[in-house]
């Protein structure tokens, strides 16, 4: 009986293997890629990074089961530059000085990430991935610069740098909630709406590889938890009153705590959906932030975020401006642990492209493929990293950090190994190292400007 059965089933297995590609093809199926980006979330804002204020059980679980980075850096110290880095694998300055800061909703509405840039969404779509962007774009205010023009099949969310979490009105008083390239108002709390659309995308594409880019607005201002009141109405400028309704400006933390709880719940829902659809073992989930948190804002608002032990905050090129919480999770493929290796948002592109089987060697990328570290625990090669804002230059080389004004009136040199808080300037004792790093930054800056010239309109 058994023998008859095996004789009968063997040809069926063979036919199935030949027709469908069978078990071999299933093994080679490229993984789904989920990139969740928080906005303005500081290094010390999550439980798994030491926060004693915020409760983040789902992110803590992601960290416990995956690889938690302690020395991961955003390409910029503000929103737009880092988003350019994430999507292109290049320093933001490769696309011009507009990416030394955030794209302005008043003076730079016609500018954005050049359409001639190659985005990771374009590369993945070419590999057969479904590509979805749900969240804050901030790489162009007009529909002809939207995600749908940069490799994404579908876009839901906001184009500008921030919107009311309930009314979805941007800082200039415009409705800012889109479906692809059309305004599409929806009722609901931003973090929850974006999550719902992301879950729909996962379900719709569960039978093919997908790239889910989920750049949450949380925890950018206006600081509104789900139960905080709406603030912005259409047709009025909110540039002078953009923070939400904060009864006690000395203590913004309770509002941020509620925003982080909603963000954490979103991560929990995404992970649960992957598990429910049987996709957990074939999906890389990455969580990061686009820049450091605000500790204070102006003279009024205090006790907002935590950047852990790192000096400075959003907009600055001390570590607190660009060292960000970052987690990589892939059950069965990435061993749980903590890494102190130096990595950067430029690295997402080559890492994702390699996993998708794309040939990207001809592309001029600034990042490196993290695969060996992620999957085999091999240390990453040493390399310098660079930052540029409208006022400041910074460079990292091994444990050394250069922080200088663009006009060179001030230049500081820190040893992060001995002095992680960047309090002891060693430039006077190390004039040669200071000179070498300044020269390297100048060289990098020249290369960026040359590249940017090729993208100029
Ligand atoms: Ca940001």
Image (spheres, grey):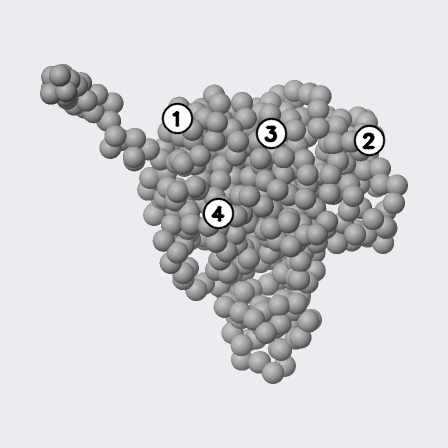
Location of residue 317 (image quadrant) = bottom right
Q: Would residue 189 appear left or right of 290 to someone viewing this image?
A: right
- Whichever of callouts 3 and 2 sits on the residue coming sooner in the sequence is 3
Give the spatial CA distance, label 4 vs label 2: 36 Å
Q: Are marks 2 and 1 in contact (CB under 8 Å)?
A: no
| Mark 3 nearby-residue class (10 Å; few <14, some 14–19, many ≥20) | many
Task: Please give the name of the residue rendered at 58% of the width and 25% of the height, measured from the top-left corner.
Answer: 197
Location of residue 136 (image quadrant) = top right
In the picture, the disc for residue 229 is 2
Q: Position of residue 66 (x, y in %)?
A: 48, 47
In the picture, the disc for residue 66 is 4
- Whichever of callouts 4 and 2 sits on the residue coming sooner in the sequence is 4
In the picture, the disc for residue 195 is 3
Task: Please give the name of the residue rendered at 49% of the width and 57% of the height, measured from the top-left corner.
Answer: 339
Indicate which label's residue lies in the foreground, 4 or 2: 4
- Whichever of callouts 2 and 1 sits on the residue coming sooner in the sequence is 1
Task: Please give the name of the residue rendered at 68% of the width and 41% of the height, measured from the top-left corner.
Answer: 260
């Amino acid at each position: 009986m058994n023998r008859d059965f095996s004789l009968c089933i063997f040809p069926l297995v063979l036919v199935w293997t030949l027709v469908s590609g069978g078990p071999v093809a299933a093994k080679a199926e490229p993984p789904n890629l989920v990139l969740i980006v928080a906005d303005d979330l500081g290094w010390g804002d999550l439980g798994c990074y030491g926060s004693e204020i915020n409760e983040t059980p789902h992110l803590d679980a992601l960290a416990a089961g995956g690889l938690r980075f302690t020395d991961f850096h955003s390409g910029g110290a503000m929103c737009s530059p880092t988003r350019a880095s994430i999507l292109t694998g290049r320093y933001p300055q490769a696309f011009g000085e507009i990416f030394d800061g955030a794209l302005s909703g008043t003076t730079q509405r016609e500018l954005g990430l050049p359409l001639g840039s190659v985005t990771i969404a374009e590369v993945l779509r070419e590999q057969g991935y479904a590509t979805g962007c749900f969240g804050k774009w901030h790489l162009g205010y007009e529909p002809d610069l939207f995600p749908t023009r940069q490799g994404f099949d579908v876009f839901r969310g906001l184009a500008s740098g921030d919107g009311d979490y309930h009314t979805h009105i941007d800082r200039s008083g415009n409705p800012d909630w889109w479906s692809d390239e059309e305004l599409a108002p929806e009722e609901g709390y931003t973090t929850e709406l974006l999550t719902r659309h992301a879950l729909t995308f996962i379900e719709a594409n569960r039978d093919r590889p997908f790239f889910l880019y989920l750049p949450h607005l949380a925890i950018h201002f206006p600081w509104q938890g789900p139960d905080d009141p709406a603030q912005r109405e259409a047709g009025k400028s909110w540039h002078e009153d953009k923070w939400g309704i904060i009864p006690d400006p000395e203590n913004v933390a309770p509002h941020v705590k509620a925003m982080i709880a909603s963000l954490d719940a979103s991560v929990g829902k995404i992970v649960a959906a992957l598990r429910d659809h049987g996709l957990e073992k074939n999906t890389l989930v990455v969580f990061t932030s686009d820049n450091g948190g605000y500790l204070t804002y102006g003279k009024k608002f205090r006790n907002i975020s935590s950047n852990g032990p790192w000096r400075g905050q959003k907009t600055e090129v001390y570590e607190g401006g660009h060292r960000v919480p970052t987690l990589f999770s892939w059950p069965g493929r990435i061993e749980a642990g903590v890494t102190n290796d130096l990595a950067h948002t430029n690295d997402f592109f080559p890492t994702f492209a390699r996993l998708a089987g794309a040939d990207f060697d001809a592309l001029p990328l600034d990042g490196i493929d993290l695969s060996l570290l992620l999957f085999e625990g091999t240390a990453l090669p040493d390399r310098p990293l660079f930052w540029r804002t409208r006022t400041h230059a910074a460079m990292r080389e091994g444990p050394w950090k250069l922080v200088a004004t663009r006009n060179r009136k001030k230049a500081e040199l820190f040893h992060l190994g001995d002095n992680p808080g960047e309090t002891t300037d060693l430039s006077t004792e190390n004039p040669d190292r200071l000179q070498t790093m300044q020269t390297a930054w100048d060289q990098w800056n020249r290369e960026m400007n040359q590249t940017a010239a090729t993208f100029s309109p």
